[in-house]
Amino acid sequence: MGKLLDLVLHPAELKAVVQFKFFRHVENPLDPKSQTPSEALCYKMLAHCSRSFVAVIMELNPELRNVVMLFYLVLRALDTIEDDMTLDPELKIPMLRTFDSKLNLKDWTFHGSGPNEKDRIVLVNFDSILTEYHKLQPKYQDIIKDVTRKMGNGMADYVVNEEFNFNGVATVKDYDLYCHYVAGLVGEGLTRMIAAADFGHPDLADKMYLSDSMGLFLQKTNIIRDFREDLDDGRSFWPKEIWAKHTDKLANFAQPEHLQEALNCSSELVLNVLDHVKDVLVYLSMVYDHSTYCFCAIPQVMAIATLALVFQNPYVFQKNVKIRKGETCSLILECRTYEGVLNVFSRYLRVIHHKCPVSDPLYLEIGMKCGELEQFIEELNPNPSHLPKGLEPRKTVYSELAQTKIRKDADVAKKLWREQFACNASLALIAVCVVTLLFKTF
């Protein structure tokens, strides 16, 4: 009932849900009849582990569809081991450090995960993952194996660190490194896959700092959002270098009397996240295959929307907050062109700017950062009406990349316009029928 009320209160999102469910053009539909039993089981596990990623992965270009699906499942298996607090460190640490070697095998499973680990299914059925993994081209196998090795060793380093388990990371530098291991490396792997498939700008593989920012932007946003959930699980990921400025004990933020300090601390964390926005927007301008671009763009627009939601939000310290389902559908539809992504980021940056109270110690810094990013977006896609008469838009390397991407999206934009027109026409017809029926009734 709550979700239905949300849609009624946000009619634009109701329209987006209708368009998403009934009119959205599905790229590269997956034919279940063509799947082997092991492949079908892999997609079943994908749906179990991630409702948000399954749809976009299934619509990827066939060149990368199974590659990305298996990449996700292998890293999900690794993550399940790391998250399982029932595993003895003497077992967990060697497993993390050597997990990449399991990819050399043809048949391996693990049944030792705690019964409450919701994603233990990927370890129990890891033999099916291995069957499909060995069908991939060697260049993709090597990427998955290399990222798994790096991530497993990075995770093990933090499991060994007992101080981290109790008090989170010590410094912002440690915070960045942790996010690099659990998310930045995912971006690295995807970037190498995009380059191997020739789906992006030739220079993309040489700019790994961009892919690292893609991962850090997502991970840091989730860390802010998941504060209460992690606290209840006895874990923490907020850097002490930041939270120690506001309290002597991180758990204090869950207490009502410490709410203002908690909000001030989260503002500093949000400001830290905003440092990655420029890299995110540049990266997306360099991905040319449309289905791969959508796969990269959707999580990023969800992240900026979530960042705006958690900013100055007292509920973050009491529960896990999430954006509305209708808003999610609207974002997925809008971000299918690069121009749409720029509009989304600009809109939520304004939300963050306007939500920041004058009393916030970082009021000036957050205002300046939002203004700087809005100006950057204007450079990427200048609005001539905003410029003084006779003044040409400023051209930079980044703006040239952005304009190239926008031109490549031209055919996509036409298809999306036809899709939206069909949705609007159908809704208008339904509205006319309803009004006519009501008129006749009364």
Image (cartoon, rainbow, N blue to C red):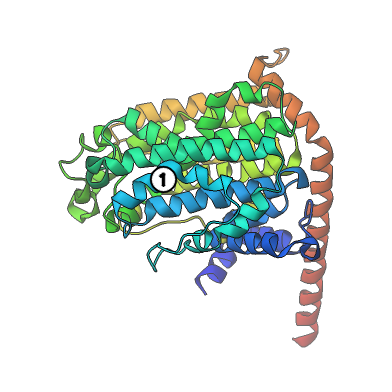
Whether residue 202 is visible to the viewer of this picture, yes or no, is: yes
Residue at (37%, 27%) from the top-left corner? 365
Q: Secondary structure at mark 1?
A: helix
123 and 403: which is toward the camera: 123
Measuring 78% from the left and 53% from the top, which residue is drawn there? Answer: 420
As drawn, is 332 to the left or to the right of 351?
right
Q: Quadrant of residue 137?
A: top right
Neighbour tally class for label 1: few under 14, some 14-19, many 20 plus, Cα within 10 Å: many
* Extreme residue in the bottom direction: 441
Q: Is residue 249 above or below residue 200?
A: below
Amino acid on which the number 1 mark rests in the picture: Leu
User: In the image shown, does 349 or 24 lie closer to the viewer?
Assistant: 24
Q: Is residue 240 above or below residue 279?
A: below
Residue at the spot of label 1: 96
Q: Position of residue 388 (x, y in %)?
A: 66, 16
Q: Is residue 186 left or right of residue 255?
A: right
Q: Residue at x 55, y 58 (%)?
A: 126
Residue 86 % position (x, y): 31, 60
The C terminus lies in quadrant? bottom right
Q: Quadrant of residue 180?
A: top left
Count of marks, rendered view: 1
Q: Quadrant of residue 145?
A: top right
Residue 227: x and y, percent?
A: 33, 50
| Residue 287 visible in rendering | no
Residue furthest out toward the left:
248
- Residue 194, position as x, y percentages in the image: 68, 34
Residue nearest the observer in this picture, 397 or 120: 120
